[in-house]
Amino acid sequence: MSSIARATRRALAVTAMICAVATGAGAHHAAAPVFDLNAEKTVTGVVKQVDWTNPHIWVWIDVANASGQVETWGFEGMSPNFLSRRGWNRTSLLPGMRISVTFRPLRDGKAGGMFMTGKLEDGTVLTSAS
């Protein structure tokens, strides 16, 4: 194989590796474009569902709005591994539990945001803080 062919193959291999790394990095979103990191809100409701999945858990709670109608709010949390190191497990939040969630709201104004802390009726506080 000629030196030009080897250099071309090496350049293609390096380019492919760079593209693979860049694609994976782009798949994990940054928080600032999605959540308003300068705002903090709290809502209280009943846990509807918890998705204990990677790369982030999701907590869904039913919240009564001002007119008394129930709306489902979605909160993105940290990874199960991260939360496990802070005392969480799959049964920390179960459907039917009442919880007050403090969160960073979604920039688009929809019902939900980035889970910061949750306080259960028994006083237990679940946190996503590092």
Image (cartoon, rainbow, N blue to C red):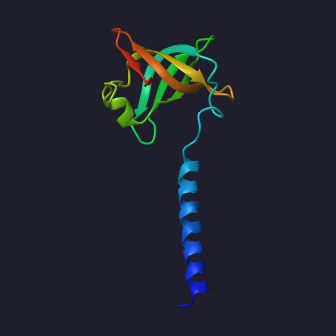
- State whether residue 73 appears in this view: no
Which residue reaches farthest bottom? 1
Residue at image location 44% in from the left, 25% down from the top: 128
Q: Nearer the viewer, residue 14 or 107?
A: 14
- State whether residue 27 appears in this view: yes
Is 120 left, or right, of 103 in this rendering? left
Q: Where on the picture, by quarter, is residue 30?
A: top right
Residue at image location 31% in from the left, 29% down from the top: 89
**Relative to residue 72, is residue 125 depicted above or below?**
above
Rendering coords of residue 7 (x, y %):
58, 79
Rendering coords of residue 6 (x, y %):
55, 82
Q: Where on the picture, by quarter, is residue 88?
A: top left
Residue at image location 53% in from the left, 53% down from the top: 24
For the image, the number of numbered tags is 0
**Relative to residue 6, is residue 23 depicted above or below?**
above
Rendering coords of residue 111 (x, y %):
60, 25
Q: Nearer the viewer, residue 92 or 79?
A: 79
Which residue reaches farthest front? 3
Is 63 left, or right, of 32 in this rendering? left
Rendering coords of residue 12 (x, y %):
59, 73
Q: Which image quarter is the C terminus in?
A: top left
Is 32 left, or right, of 130 in this rendering? right
